[in-house]
Amino acid sequence: MSSKSSLTLKPRKFVAGGAALATAPDGRAVFIEGALPGETVVARVTKSARDYLLADLERVLEPAPER
């Protein structure tokens, strides 16, 4: 998966630093800036590493009640 790809994900919890944690289809951890746990989001990958991806929130498809 290259940087600048977009993924539809459902973050499950916050992690240190405030990013929301989700799992990519290939099993890697995805740290999404701007997303909330429990939402369904489209996230744009900004960095791709062997074990994880960094991503920015592009669009909220299903918001969390807290939004």
Image (cartoon, helix red, strand yellow):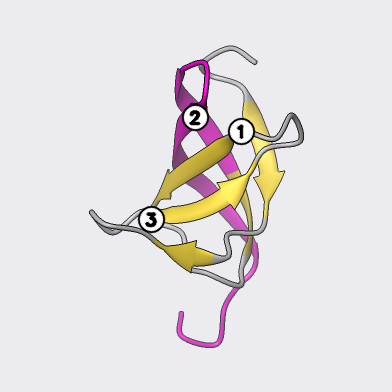
Cα distance between the residues tagged 3 and 1: 19 Å
Rendering quarter of residue 14: bottom left
Seen from the viewer's position, the closer of residues 44 and 49 is 49
Q: Residue at x 76, y 35 (%)?
A: 25
Give the mark, 2 or 3, whose residue is nearer the N terminus: 3
Q: Which residue is mark 1?
A: 28
**Above or below: residue 48 compared with residue 30:** above
Q: Earlier in the sequence, mark 3 or mark 1?
A: 1
Q: Residue at x 71, y 45 (%)?
A: 8
Residue depicted at 49% across the width and 67% down the height: 13
Q: The N terminus is located in which quarter?
A: top right
Return the disc, 1 or 2, that comes first in the chain's sequence. 1
- Asked if residue 58 is among those painted magenta in the image, a careful observer would answer yes
**SS at circle 2:** strand
Q: Secondary structure at mark 1?
A: loop
Label 3 neighbour load within 10 Å: few <14, some 14-19, many 20+ = some
Q: Give the CA separation, mark 2 to mark 3.
A: 15 Å
Q: Disc 3 on helix, strand or loop?
A: loop
Q: Which mark is residue 53?
A: 2
In this figure, which residue is indicated by the disc labeled 3?
Answer: 34
